[in-house]
Image (spheres, rainbow, N blue to C red):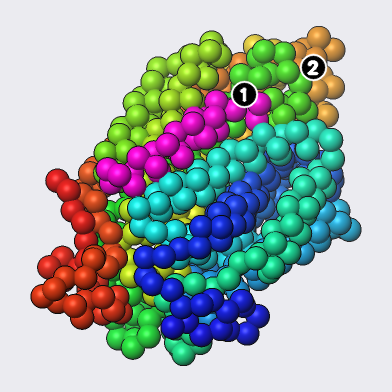
């Protein structure tokens, strides 16, 4: 029988198979809203950065400001990736609803503060970064516990549908954020943060009034695994930050992978994560039960989730650069309006999520996760391969069809994969398992920044200097000035394209421009020169990036297939020969296929 906890509604004892039908829809609605606002805010800043930098009067092309740009991108993501496991574990011990509601409250307060940031320049940038980190804490609490709340509320034969709706909202939110950010950035950059406030207030009040604790938890008797939390958190932060800083120039190199700081972060982070594994094996009450990785459905699902998240993140960044930096300016759009139109032209990707996600979740309840997750990743791989064949100045209908196919593939994968992971764990560990799933997903997104930007910079470095020099000298720029600009680190040109920004005026400087004719200056600083100049080198880098994304999608498809058939860690109907098996608390079930209550299909 469940005990009532302080601040939560008491729940009467019920048979294991019974569910309050009205409550489960309340739980689904609220947690879907929570995941939607959390993931919208993981991407809304990406497309709004040009407006934010203009709003706080910060020049994005100054070398010292690249760090601000990166931290505005990754601060929220790193915090949410690192903390979700710990917050999931806290939910297992003290109550998932309590942790979830606290997350909505923290998220809402941080959103209000972000919208009223008082300072400009570097001080304003630091304030935004700090508040985004606080907002990420709230987002991590939401992500860590929403899946566990749903798994508690829905019976096993409906979880795929419920988790599918929730997960599709989460994944669609990362692309809806691009559209919303483009729309709001065109109006006022502060609205990018304030748009979440009404939904945050609604979700907070609604959650405190209506959500209630359920499922098996430790009821406050578990211990906090401080050593596990410290080694995991610091180690993962070090690895993610090291990978992100690896794309910045160092010394005479185009990237910083040989930087002592980057090497220290990477080596130290990996060592701490290795120490985390040792600590968890020795802990009597660990942050996460590593034995769960012996369950094939759990380990394969998380591997598939990680690599698919890396591929999806790479797609998102490359599409923004492609649209904002090249395609839209070539089609007559001003640089100031490219964030808005980039979000609009990426709508087919979101539409694909919304079409496929709930349906695949419902079907996976009946047929298992394997066919839909595997097929979805194969469709994503095919769409990445087709994107490689498109010309830089592509026909939009073909581009939209490929985005729709990629969105459908991701929708087919996401819901069944999530349901497969959550169905594979014991009820008392659902919070930590949900946190681990979110960690893989969020860490994959951060890893994609370092990986795909590195691949793109490598591709640009091979061709951009020659192209820049030829284009500049052909328009009257003196050879000495053209040589200087051509040999600048290509990451500057990449970020300029990412921000939808023409950097030629800044790179050449007023002294060089003064020596040119008005017609030459107008051409160099116009809408078409810079996009045309980088189109060829960018196409070369884009082929490398999409090839890597296709390979990762194939790895995710293989992992999804290897998960095995349908697996549900749940009580079967009482068996006459073994009535004691109905307890559901036996830790020995983890990873033991003979003793697990599972349902397998070939």
* Location of mark 2 (residue): 521
- Using the image, determine if residue 108 lies above or below residue 162: below
* Location of mark 1 (residue): 345
Residue located at (65% from left, 30% from top) = 343
Q: To which quarter of the image does residue 459 belong?
A: top left
Q: How many residues crowd mark 2 within 10 Å: few (<14), some (14–19), many (20+)?
A: some
- Using the image, determine if residue 334 lies above or below residue 362: above
Residue 561 on image: x %, y %: 23, 44
| Residue 455 visible in the displayed image | no
- Using the image, determine if residue 82 lies above or below residue 378: below
SS for dot 2: helix
Residue located at (81% from left, 61% from top) = 113
Residue 511 on image: x %, y %: 82, 28
Q: In the image, is residue 148 part of the stretch drawn in magenta?
A: no
| Residue 474 visible in the displayed image | yes
Residue 290 relative to residue 255: left or right: left
- Using the image, determine if residue 464 lies above or below residue 22: above
Residue extent of the magenta highlight:
342-368
Residue 24 on image: x %, y %: 52, 58
Residue located at (30% from left, 61% from top) = 424
Looking at marks 2 and 1 on the same chain, the residue that comes earlier in the sequence is marked by: 1
Residue located at (56% from left, 61% from top) = 23
How much space separates mark 2 and mark 1, taking CA atoms?
31 Å
Q: Of 424 and 492, which appears nearest the observer?
A: 424
Task: State whether the magenta stretch is mostly helix, strand or loop.
Answer: helix
Q: How many residues crowd mark 1 within 10 Å: few (<14), some (14–19), many (20+)?
A: some
Residue 388 relative to residue 347: left or right: left
């Amino acid at each position: 029988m469940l005990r009532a906890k302080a601040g939560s509604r008491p729940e009467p004892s019920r048979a294991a198979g019974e569910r309050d039908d009205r409550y489960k829809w309340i739980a689904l609605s609220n947690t879907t809203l929570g995941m939607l606002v959390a993931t919208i805010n993981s991407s809304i800043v990406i497309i709004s950065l040009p407006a934010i930098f203009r709003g706080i009067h910060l020049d994005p092309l100054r070398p010292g400001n690249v760090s601000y740009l990166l931290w505005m991108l990754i601060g929220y993501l790193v915090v949410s990736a690192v903390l979700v496991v710990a917050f999931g574990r806290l939910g297992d011990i003290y109550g998932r609803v309590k942790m979830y509601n606290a997350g909505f409250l923290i998220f809402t307060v941080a959103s209000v503060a972000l919208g009223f940031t008082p300072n400009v320049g570097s001080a304003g940038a630091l304030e935004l970064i700090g508040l985004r980190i606080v907002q990420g804490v709230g987002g991590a609490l939401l992500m860590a516990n929403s899946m566990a709340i749903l798994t508690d509320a829905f019976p096993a034969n409906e979880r795929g549908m419920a988790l599918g709706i929730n997960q599709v909202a989460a994944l669609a939110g990362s692309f809806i954020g691009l559209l919303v950010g483009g729309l709001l950035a065109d109006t006022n950059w502060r609205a990018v943060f304030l748009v979440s406030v009404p939904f945050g207030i609604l979700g907070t009040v609604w959650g405190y009034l209506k959500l209630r604790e359920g499922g098996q938890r430790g009821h406050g008797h578990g211990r906090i695994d401080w050593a596990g939390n410290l080694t995991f958190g610091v180690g993962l932060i070090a690895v993610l930050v090291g990978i992100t800083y690896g794309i910045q120039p160092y010394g005479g190199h185009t990237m910083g992978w040989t930087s002592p700081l980057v090497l220290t972060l990477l080596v130290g982070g990996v060592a701490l994560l290795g120490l985390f594994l040792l600590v968890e094996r020795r802990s009597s009450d660990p942050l996460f039960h590593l034995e769960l990785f012996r369950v094939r459905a759990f380990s394969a699902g998380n591997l598939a989730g990680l690599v698919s998240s890396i591929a999806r993140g790479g797609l998102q960044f490359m599409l923004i650069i492609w649209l904002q930096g090249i395609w839209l300016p070539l089609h007559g759009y001003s640089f100031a309006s490219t964030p808005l139109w980039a979000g609009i032209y990426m709508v087919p990707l979101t539409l694909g999520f919304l079409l496929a996600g709930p349906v695949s979740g419902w079907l996976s309840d009946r047929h298992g996760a394997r066919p839909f997750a595997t097929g979805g990743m194969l469709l994503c791989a095919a769409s990445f391969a087709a994107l490689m064949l498109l010309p830089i100045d592509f026909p939009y209908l073909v581009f939209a069809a490929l985005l729709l196919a990629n969105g459908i593939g991701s929708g087919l994968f996401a819901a069944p994969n999530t349901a497969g992971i959550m169905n594979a764990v014991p009820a008392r560990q659902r919070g930590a398992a949900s946190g681990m799933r979110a960690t893989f997903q969020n860490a994959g997104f951060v890893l994609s920044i370092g990986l795909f930007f590195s691949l793109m910079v490598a591709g640009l470095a091979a061709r951009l200097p020659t192209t820049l020099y030829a284009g500049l000298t052909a328009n009257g720029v003196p050879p000495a000035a053209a040589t200087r600009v051509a040999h600048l680190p290509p990451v500057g040109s990449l970020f300029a394209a990412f921000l939808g920004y023409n950097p030629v005026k800044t790179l050449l400087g007023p002294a060089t421009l003064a020596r040119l004719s008005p017609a030459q200056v107008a051409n160099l600083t116009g809408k078409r020169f810079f996009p045309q100049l980088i189109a060829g080198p960018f196409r070369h880098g884009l082929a490398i990036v999409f090839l890597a994304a296709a390979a990762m999608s194939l790895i995710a498809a293989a992992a999804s297939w290897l998960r095995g058939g349908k697996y549900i860690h749940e009580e079967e109907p009482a068996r006459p020969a073994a009535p004691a098996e109905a307890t559901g608390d036996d830790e020995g079930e983890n990873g033991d296929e003979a003793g697990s209550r599972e349902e397998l299909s070939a």
